[in-house]
Amino acid sequence: MKELIAILIAMILMSLFFFGNYDLINTGKVVDKKYESEIKTRFSLILQGYNTYNLNERRTLPISNWQSEYQKYSSLPNDFKNMSWSYNSNSNGNYFCLSGEVFSENIINALNNIKNNYPVDSFYYNTNCGSTTNFLENPSISSGVQVSATFYIK
Protein backbone atom coordinates (compact mmCIF):
# COMPACT_ATOMS: atom_id res chain seq x y z
CA MET A 1 0.00 0.00 0.00
CA LYS A 2 2.87 2.36 0.80
CA GLU A 3 4.34 1.66 -2.61
CA LEU A 4 1.08 2.60 -4.37
CA ILE A 5 0.90 5.89 -2.48
CA ALA A 6 4.54 6.62 -3.32
CA ILE A 7 3.92 5.85 -7.01
CA LEU A 8 0.79 8.03 -7.02
CA ILE A 9 2.66 10.94 -5.44
CA ALA A 10 5.52 10.49 -7.91
CA MET A 11 3.06 10.54 -10.84
CA ILE A 12 1.39 13.69 -9.52
CA LEU A 13 4.74 15.42 -9.10
CA MET A 14 5.88 14.36 -12.58
CA SER A 15 2.61 15.62 -14.07
CA LEU A 16 3.01 18.96 -12.33
CA PHE A 17 6.56 19.24 -13.57
CA PHE A 18 5.81 18.38 -17.21
CA PHE A 19 2.45 20.10 -17.58
CA GLY A 20 2.80 22.89 -15.05
CA ASN A 21 6.18 24.21 -16.18
CA TYR A 22 5.61 24.73 -19.88
CA ASP A 23 7.30 28.09 -19.54
CA LEU A 24 10.67 26.37 -19.10
CA ILE A 25 10.91 26.22 -22.91
CA ASN A 26 11.67 29.59 -24.48
CA THR A 27 8.91 29.63 -27.09
CA GLY A 28 9.89 33.16 -28.14
CA LYS A 29 13.10 31.86 -29.73
CA VAL A 30 11.13 29.21 -31.60
CA VAL A 31 8.78 31.86 -32.99
CA ASP A 32 11.75 34.11 -33.86
CA LYS A 33 13.28 31.31 -35.96
CA LYS A 34 9.92 30.51 -37.58
CA TYR A 35 9.42 34.14 -38.63
CA GLU A 36 13.02 34.39 -39.80
CA SER A 37 12.55 31.32 -41.97
CA GLU A 38 9.25 32.62 -43.40
CA ILE A 39 10.73 36.02 -44.30
CA LYS A 40 13.83 34.49 -45.89
CA THR A 41 11.69 32.03 -47.88
CA ARG A 42 9.47 34.83 -49.19
CA PHE A 43 12.50 36.90 -50.14
CA SER A 44 13.95 33.90 -51.99
CA LEU A 45 10.66 33.46 -53.85
CA ILE A 46 10.44 37.11 -54.83
CA LEU A 47 14.06 37.02 -55.99
CA GLN A 48 13.39 33.91 -58.10
CA GLY A 49 10.52 35.72 -59.78
CA TYR A 50 12.73 38.76 -60.36
CA ASN A 51 15.41 36.60 -61.99
CA THR A 52 12.83 34.74 -64.09
CA TYR A 53 11.47 38.05 -65.36
CA ASN A 54 14.95 39.37 -66.18
CA LEU A 55 15.88 36.19 -68.09
CA ASN A 56 12.67 36.07 -70.11
CA GLU A 57 12.35 39.78 -70.84
CA ARG A 58 16.10 40.34 -71.23
CA ARG A 59 15.84 43.48 -69.14
CA THR A 60 15.61 44.50 -65.51
CA LEU A 61 12.20 44.61 -63.86
CA PRO A 62 10.89 48.18 -64.25
CA ILE A 63 10.08 50.24 -61.16
CA SER A 64 6.93 51.97 -62.48
CA ASN A 65 4.62 48.98 -63.02
CA TRP A 66 6.71 46.30 -61.36
CA GLN A 67 3.84 44.24 -59.95
CA SER A 68 2.03 43.70 -63.23
CA GLU A 69 5.33 43.02 -65.04
CA TYR A 70 6.50 40.67 -62.29
CA GLN A 71 3.25 38.71 -62.40
CA LYS A 72 3.77 37.84 -66.07
CA TYR A 73 6.13 35.09 -64.86
CA SER A 74 5.62 34.64 -61.11
CA SER A 75 3.18 35.17 -58.30
CA LEU A 76 4.13 37.63 -55.63
CA PRO A 77 4.76 36.03 -52.23
CA ASN A 78 2.06 36.67 -49.67
CA ASP A 79 2.37 39.65 -47.39
CA PHE A 80 3.83 38.83 -43.99
CA LYS A 81 2.05 39.81 -40.75
CA ASN A 82 0.63 43.12 -42.11
CA MET A 83 3.89 43.86 -43.92
CA SER A 84 3.78 44.21 -47.70
CA TRP A 85 6.30 44.07 -50.55
CA SER A 86 7.51 46.99 -52.62
CA TYR A 87 10.24 47.38 -55.25
CA ASN A 88 12.39 50.41 -55.95
CA SER A 89 15.94 51.59 -56.56
CA ASN A 90 18.38 54.17 -55.28
CA SER A 91 22.11 54.87 -55.64
CA ASN A 92 22.83 51.48 -53.99
CA GLY A 93 20.84 49.54 -56.59
CA ASN A 94 17.47 47.85 -56.93
CA TYR A 95 15.81 46.44 -53.85
CA PHE A 96 12.73 44.72 -52.55
CA CYS A 97 11.31 45.99 -49.31
CA LEU A 98 9.02 44.33 -46.80
CA SER A 99 7.40 47.07 -44.73
CA GLY A 100 4.55 47.76 -42.36
CA GLU A 101 3.59 48.43 -38.80
CA VAL A 102 4.99 45.80 -36.45
CA PHE A 103 3.47 44.85 -33.11
CA SER A 104 5.56 41.75 -32.43
CA GLU A 105 8.95 41.55 -30.75
CA ASN A 106 9.41 38.22 -32.57
CA ILE A 107 9.37 39.96 -35.97
CA ILE A 108 11.99 42.47 -34.78
CA ASN A 109 14.14 39.60 -33.49
CA ALA A 110 13.73 37.70 -36.77
CA LEU A 111 14.79 40.74 -38.81
CA ASN A 112 17.75 41.28 -36.52
CA ASN A 113 18.80 37.64 -37.03
CA ILE A 114 18.51 38.03 -40.81
CA LYS A 115 20.61 41.21 -40.65
CA ASN A 116 23.33 39.33 -38.80
CA ASN A 117 23.35 36.47 -41.34
CA TYR A 118 23.10 38.29 -44.68
CA PRO A 119 26.13 39.63 -46.55
CA VAL A 120 27.22 43.18 -45.73
CA ASP A 121 25.40 45.86 -47.75
CA SER A 122 22.59 43.56 -48.86
CA PHE A 123 20.03 43.79 -46.03
CA TYR A 124 18.96 46.63 -43.74
CA TYR A 125 16.01 47.12 -41.45
CA ASN A 126 14.93 50.56 -40.35
CA THR A 127 11.86 52.79 -40.67
CA ASN A 128 12.20 53.51 -44.41
CA CYS A 129 12.56 51.34 -47.48
CA GLY A 130 15.87 51.84 -49.26
CA SER A 131 17.72 52.53 -46.06
CA THR A 132 21.43 51.78 -45.82
CA THR A 133 21.57 51.83 -42.03
CA ASN A 134 19.98 49.63 -39.42
CA PHE A 135 18.21 50.56 -36.23
CA LEU A 136 20.90 51.38 -33.69
CA GLU A 137 18.94 49.33 -31.17
CA ASN A 138 15.81 47.25 -31.48
CA PRO A 139 12.75 49.52 -31.61
CA SER A 140 10.11 49.43 -28.89
CA ILE A 141 6.94 47.86 -30.21
CA SER A 142 4.62 48.78 -27.34
CA SER A 143 2.23 50.66 -29.64
CA GLY A 144 3.50 49.40 -32.99
CA VAL A 145 6.41 50.73 -34.98
CA GLN A 146 6.97 51.27 -38.71
CA VAL A 147 9.58 48.78 -39.88
CA SER A 148 11.04 48.33 -43.34
CA ALA A 149 13.30 45.46 -44.30
CA THR A 150 15.29 46.32 -47.43
CA PHE A 151 16.79 43.46 -49.46
CA TYR A 152 19.25 44.86 -52.01
CA ILE A 153 19.57 42.79 -55.18
CA LYS A 154 23.25 42.07 -55.78
Image (tube, rainbow, N blue to C red):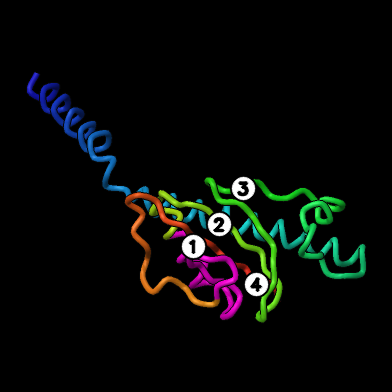
Instruction: Please state if 59 lies on the left or on the right of 137 as rendered.
Output: right
The quadrant in which residue 12 appears is: top left
Residue that label 4 marks? 152
Quadrant location of the C terminus in the rendered image:
bottom right
Residue that label 1 marks? 111
Q: In this view, does 67 lie above or below 95?
A: above
Task: Identify the secondary structure beneath mark 4.
Answer: strand
Q: Position of residue 80 (x, y in %)?
A: 57, 48
* First to last magenta residue range: 109-131
- Seen at 65% across and 59% down, the residue is 43
The answer to whether marks 1 and 2 mark residues whose Cβ atoms lie closer than 8 Å is no
Residue 32: numbered disc: none
Q: How many labels does the image show?
A: 4
CA distance separating discs 2 and 4: 14 Å
Closer to the camera in the image, 139 or 115: 139
Q: Is residue 55 above or below residue 12?
A: below
Q: In this view, does 96 lie above or below 120?
A: above
Residue farthest left in this picture: 2
The answer to whether marks 1 and 4 mark residues whose Cβ atoms lie closer than 8 Å is no
Query: Local crowd at mark 3 within 10 Å, few (<14), some, or many (≥20)?
Result: some
Compare marks 3 and 1 and give the one earlier in the sequence: 3
Task: Identify the secondary structure beneath mark 1.
Answer: helix
Compare marks 1 and 2 and give the one earlier in the sequence: 2
Nearer to us: label 1 or label 4: 4
Q: Does the magenta stretch include residue 88?
A: no
Q: Is residue 52 above or below residue 82?
A: below
Quadrant location of the N terminus in the rendered image:
top left
Closer to the camera in the image, 18 or 81: 81
Q: What amino acid is at disc 3?
A: Asp
CA distance separating discs 4 and 3: 18 Å
Residue farthest top in this picture: 1
Residue that label 3 marks? 79
